Amino acid sequence: MTLSETRLAIQATRMAYRTACLAIQAARQSGRAIR
């Protein structure tokens, strides 16, 4: 892998991590709303 490919992979991982965190927070909030 070249340096640019590594950077792209890191960016993709960060975006996926952020998306997962947002999804977890949304699930928690919706769970509270249901209760």
Image (tube, helix red, strand yellow):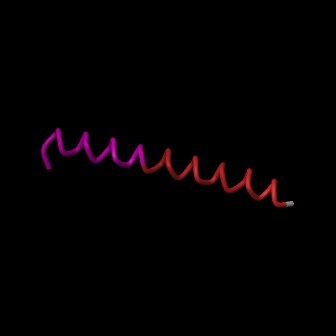
- Whether residue 31 sits left or right of residue 18 in the image: it is right
- The region drawn magenta spans 1-15
- Whether residue 1 sits left or right of residue 12 in the image: it is left
For the point 53% across and 53% down, which residue is it? 20
Foreground residue among 27 and 16: 27
Rendered location of residue 21, percent (x, y)? 57, 48
Chief secondary structure of the magenta portion: helix
Rendered location of residue 14, percent (x, y)? 41, 43
Q: Quadrant of the C terminus?
A: bottom right
Foreground residue among 27 and 6: 27
- Whether residue 13 sits left or right of residue 9 in the image: it is right
- Whether residue 26 sits left or right of residue 34 in the image: it is left
Rendered location of residue 11, percent (x, y)? 33, 41
For the point 72% across and 54% down, which residue is it? 28
Foreground residue among 2 and 14: 14
Q: How many marks?
A: 0
Rendered location of residue 33, percent (x, y)? 81, 54
Residue occupying the far front of the picture: 34
For the point 77% across and 59% down, which residue is it? 31
Q: Is residue 5 magenta?
A: yes
For the point 14% across and 50% down, which residue is it? 1
Quadrant of residue 3 within the rendered picture: top left
Q: In this view, does 21 lie above or below 3?
A: below
Residue occupying the far right of the picture: 35
Q: Does the magenta stretch include residue 12?
A: yes
